Amino acid sequence: MQSMIPGALDGVRILDLSRILAGPSATQLLGDLGADVVKVEKPGEGDDTRKWGPPYVVGKDGRDTDESAYYLSANRNKRSIAIDIATEDGRALLHRLLARADVLVENYKVGGLARHGLDYPSLRQRYPGLVYCSVTGFGQTGPYARRAGYDFLIQGMGGIMSLTGETDGTPMKVGVGIADVMTGMYAAVGILAALRHRDATGEGQQIDISLLDSQIAWLVNAGTNYLASAEVPKRLANGHPNIVPYQVFETADGPMILAVGNDGQFRRFCEVAGIEAVARDERYGTNVARVRHREAVCEAVQAALRTRPRQYWLQSLEAVNVPCGPVNDLREVFEDPHVQERGAHLRMPCDWARDGAVSLLANPLKLSRTPVSYRRAPPRLNEHVDEILRDWGGGARA
């Protein structure tokens, strides 16, 4: 599939007991960086997202398989084994794998693995170097700890929906499972930090990462704006709370984004737009003034932009280094020549798909010495049981 330059995490073994999106996105990222990821799934069912469709991958017979596009998004560079951890034999098999693992990732409800003796306190003495990452909705402690966590609920509880949507409209979630994805990113960083500590001291540890904690952390400037002012921010549609003009505007033939980041850019915009007087007006000349007079500034900008088509503005403003851009649909995204040059669309060989490959989103990391690699397409359920036991378990099936 790709020249096998050893990845940065070559030799790291990860036992992935997670499902849905947050945990699997973390382990996929680590797998792209070279880790050997074994996906442990429930026999007969597997990861819930395998059935989250349509769309599904079309198989060799021209019919939909039972593997959804959603499942593909977070499960490459993994091998699958089905283990029933509720049985004694299943737990014994899992321990054979744990004996060779560096990392365990799980997203069971708090206490869910304790009844099987697979919680961190139960494993710590037996596997002192194990990095054990627990991904939950609300964390291992606190009054909500035993609640199930879902991305949509977390976006609502964590504040991002209160900031997203039209000013006088209904609060809106982000169009992808961003709370899950960002939790996966934080989890991957935590695992790397814990591995660094383990390599230095031999000591493993538990990582307690929750969707709600992560969601609140990535409120970033909106969160700190509130903490600094004690003022609950209102939705600004596509506007920015601290910069004006920085939003979507209509042109003569469609929407575009104008993202003015400083006073010099605003002056250059006004020159191109033929509204130099606006830039000279003391009410609008600085960003502080423009934020205070947001509505009037945006009305003047909007009136100017409606006079010409979008492509005129994109070309004219880019020529004077004023940040701007189109609002692309996904077809336009993947047809963009820059996106194509950067390799954002990945085709991975897959012998059970109709045309012998599946389409995925590429990893954005560009490492000069230890590049990411694409070694395995997302696996079928239990596809690699014999291979895993040969490589990890020290023998054949129990």
Image (cartoon, rainbow, N blue to C red):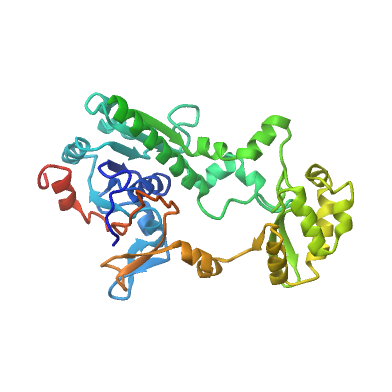
Q: Position of residue 34 (x, y in %)?
A: 31, 48
Q: Is residue 146 above or below residue 62?
A: above
Residue sitting at x 39%, y 33%? 193
Q: How many marks?
A: 0
- Decide which of 274, 59 is in the foreground and name it: 274
Q: Would you say residue 204 is visible in this rendering?
A: no
Q: Position of residue 7 (x, y in %)?
A: 31, 48
Horizontal side of residue 251 vs 155, given as left or right: right
- Decide which of 156, 348 is in the foreground and name it: 348
Residue sitting at x 42%, y 62%? 53
What is the quadrant of the N terminus in the image?
Answer: bottom left
What is the quadrant of the C terminus in the image?
Answer: top left
Q: Position of residue 397 (x, y in %)?
A: 12, 47
Horizontal side of residue 300 vs 206, given as left or right: right
Q: Is residue 123 above or below residue 2?
A: above
Horizontal side of residue 311 vs 19, given as left or right: right
Residue sitting at x 30%, y 24%? 201
Q: Position of residue 300 (x, y in %)?
A: 84, 58
Seen as rendered, the residue at the extreme bottom is 62
Q: Would you say residue 227 is visible in this rendering?
A: yes
Q: Quadrant of residue 72?
A: bottom left
Residue sitting at x 66%, y 45%? 163
- Decide which of 272, 313 is in the foreground and name it: 272
